[in-house]
Image: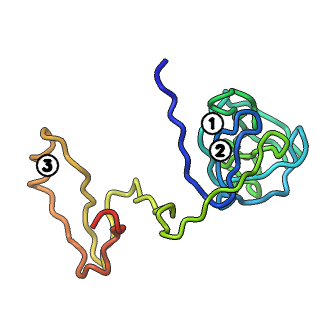
Amino acid sequence: MGRIFIENHGGTRLVVCRFCKTYLTNRSELISSRFQGSSGRAMLFHRAWNLDYSEAQHRDMMTGKHIVRDVMCRICHKKVGWMYEFAMEESQRYKEARVILEKALVDEEDGFPDPAGALETHEQPPSSPVFETFGGRRGIRLTALSRSDSRLASRTTTHPPATAAESPRCHECS
């Protein structure tokens, strides 16, 4: 089966599985704590980690019809909430790809401060479109090419940023 790797994205307030204390998310990912689950109050998060997902299923909920997946802790396999795959009503679309964790099934614990800011999330580069804008000019974003694709790099031109200030690099890339 292989090894199970557990992600921990830190934070000052951690949300963990009540049964095995596996890290699931942190309070900085919280969107709203005004949700209702089958076991009581629940919280809506942008992202959560260390979860396994059930098959998608249609559910009639208080806010309308949704396609959802139950989410289980990756370590103890206990259900801790669900994830919204699709909302039928336009007003509920903000929930799509978000995770609900039920307060009765998770605990909050103290995390740790991050004075250096090393745990701040970096914006992910766009996966599409292929073109990016650098100071008003367009250029092709090149990714690492394999040896067989190296001939493509010689025919592809890019327009680098005019100054270093316009560069979209993070401090780790420079």
Q: Secondary structure at mark 1?
A: strand
Kind of residue at disc 2? Leu
**In the image, what residue occupies the spot 77% across and 43% down?**
106
Identify the residue position indicated by label 1 in the image. Answer: 51
Q: Residues within 10 Å of mark 1 (few under 14, many from 20)?
A: many
Q: Secondary structure at mark 3?
A: helix
Asked which colour scheme the image uses, the reply is rainbow
Q: CA distance from mark 2 to mark 1?
A: 7 Å
The image shows residue 47 at horizontal and vertical percentages of 62, 50
**In the image, what residue occupies the spot 70% across and 56% down?**
110
Pointer 2 or 1: first along the chain: 2
The image shows residue 168 at horizontal and vertical percentages of 35, 70
Residue 38, quarter of picture: top right
**In the image, what residue occupies the spot 24% across and 56% down?**
142
Residue 125, quarter of picture: bottom left
Q: Are marks 3 and 2 in contact (CB under 8 Å)?
A: no
- Please state which of the two labelled residues, at mark 3 or mark 2, is closer to the viewer: 2
**In the image, what residue occupies the spot 48% across and 25% down?**
3
Identify the residue position indicated by label 3 in the image. Answer: 152
Kind of residue at disc 1? Leu
The image shows residue 59 at horizontal and vertical percentages of 81, 35
Toward the top, the furthest residue is 1
Task: State left or right for residue 128 relative to residue 141.
Answer: right
Identify the residue position indicated by label 2 in the image. Answer: 24
- Please state which of the two labelled residues, at mark 1 or mark 3, is closer to the viewer: 1
Q: Are marks 2 and 1 in contact (CB under 8 Å)?
A: yes
